[in-house]
Every structure is written in C-alpha cells, then in structure tokens.
Image (spheres, grey):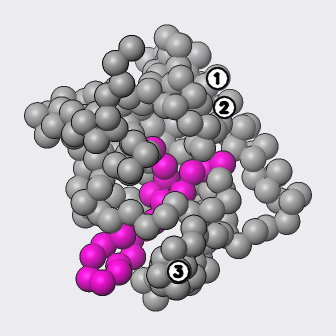
Amino acid sequence: MVEIENEIISEIVAQALKQGQRPFVTVSSSSMVPLLKVGDNIRLAPVSIQDLSPGEIVVLETRDGMLAHRFLGLDSRQGKQILVTKGDRLEKLDPPIFSDKLIGRVISRRRGRRTISLDRGFAKFINHLLYLLSRKDITKREGSFEAQARYIKPDVERGNRPKSPRGSRFFNRFRYLMAILLTTLVDLRSRIPFRK
C-alpha cells in the first residue's frame, strides 16, 4: 500500500472545493462521537472565515492530517485570527489553529446507505443542540473566550495543550448521553419517509 502524505491529501481536498466540487472524506477518529463515527463519510463545502457560524463542523489542516471538529469562535494572536475548535467528545480545546488552515465545513454525513444533511432541517437543529452541549464550559466575554484565557495566551507560549475547565463527572456523562439521544433522533428521523 502506498502511503500518501497528509499535506498532499489536504491540498487535493482544498483544490476540489475551490473547483466547486463537494468531496466526501472518511472520518478516522472518534473525537466527534456520536454524531460522526469512525468510518462515516462527511461531505465538505467551501466556507470563508466570515461565513462561519459557531456550532458548524469545520475541517482543518493540521500537521497530523485533516481534522473535523466543531467551530466555537474566533480569537486573535499576534494580529492573526485563530479558530477555536473542539471535538464534541473531548474535554479540551484543540491547540491554536490559524484561520489559513481552514479547508471547508461539513454539510452532510453518510453512514451506510443513509445520508443526513447537517445544514438544514431537523438535523441542523439537533446539530445546534449538540454544539450547545459541547460548549457548556466555554463562556464568551469581550470577544475572547474568558474561560480559555490560558489556552490563547500563556499555555501557547509554554507549549502546553489547552485545557477546558472540567465539569462534574455526572454532568459529563449526562451530556454524553444527551448527545447520543439527539444523534439517535436524527438517525431515526432519516429513516422515516417524508410525506408531502
């Protein structure tokens, strides 16, 4: 098997988006479970920083390959915009990712033979609820993520990974169970034939 470098794959996907295509990529991590599972195919669409809304799932280029995580907001560092992102299942924010690493946003998920659009209808509503559950410990104040001040400033300078404030163990389990329930509702809804 031929190993293709992550940068080349990211560039191919970015070029396809620039040419107006909507490519599918395969999820290879469980950081967005239960909405996105390993083996799911996600369809991408081009997006600019100005058009991003908190809660959307974005695909970014990282040194380890492409990363599909939830967009929480923007911050800045040394005059450059930083995307604040986080996996739904993770308690920590992602390391700082500059805005030029944005590849696109996720518009649908295909699991088996079923495709669910994440940018309209019932699934968009559920996706927004999952965003609210995922960001429960992040508070926005004065254009910056106050609860994450360590993430943006000193931790980056010390080279530490960002840390989100931890909630109670009970709440984290409750939040995860709610995410499973909401995702199950989306999956069930996709199986019910639409009547006009």
Left or right position of 40 against 8: right
Q: Is residue 83 magenta?
A: yes
Check disc 2: other Cα within 10 Å, few if <14, some if 14-19, many if 20+. some
Q: Nearer the viewer, mark 3 or mark 1?
A: 3
Task: Describe the element under mark 1 as helix, strand or loop.
Answer: helix
Percent of width and height locating residue 75? 39, 76
Check disc 3: other Cα within 10 Å, few if <14, some if 14-19, many if 20+. few
CB contact under 8 Å: marks 2 and 1:
yes
Q: Is residue 47 magenta?
A: no
Q: Which residue is mark 2?
A: 185
Quadrant of the drawing holding the N terminus: top left
Check disc 3 and give the amino acid type: Arg
Residue ranking furthest to the left: 19
Check disc 1 and give the amino acid type: Leu
Q: Which residues are magenta?
A: 68-89
Residue 149 to residue 194: above or below? below
| Residue 100 lies in quadrant | bottom left
| Residue 105 lies in quadrant | top left
Residue 127 to residue 2: above or below? below
Q: CA distance from mark 2 to mark 1?
A: 5 Å
Residue 70 to residue 180: above or below? below
Q: CA distance from mark 3 to mark 1?
A: 46 Å
At 61% across and 50% down in the image, what residue appears? 88
Does any portion of residue 8 appear in the rendered image?
yes
20 and 188: which one is in front? Answer: 20
Q: Which mark is residue 158?
A: 3
Q: CA distance from mark 3 to mark 2?
A: 43 Å
Percent of width and height locating residue 120? 41, 39
Left or right position of 132 against 143: right
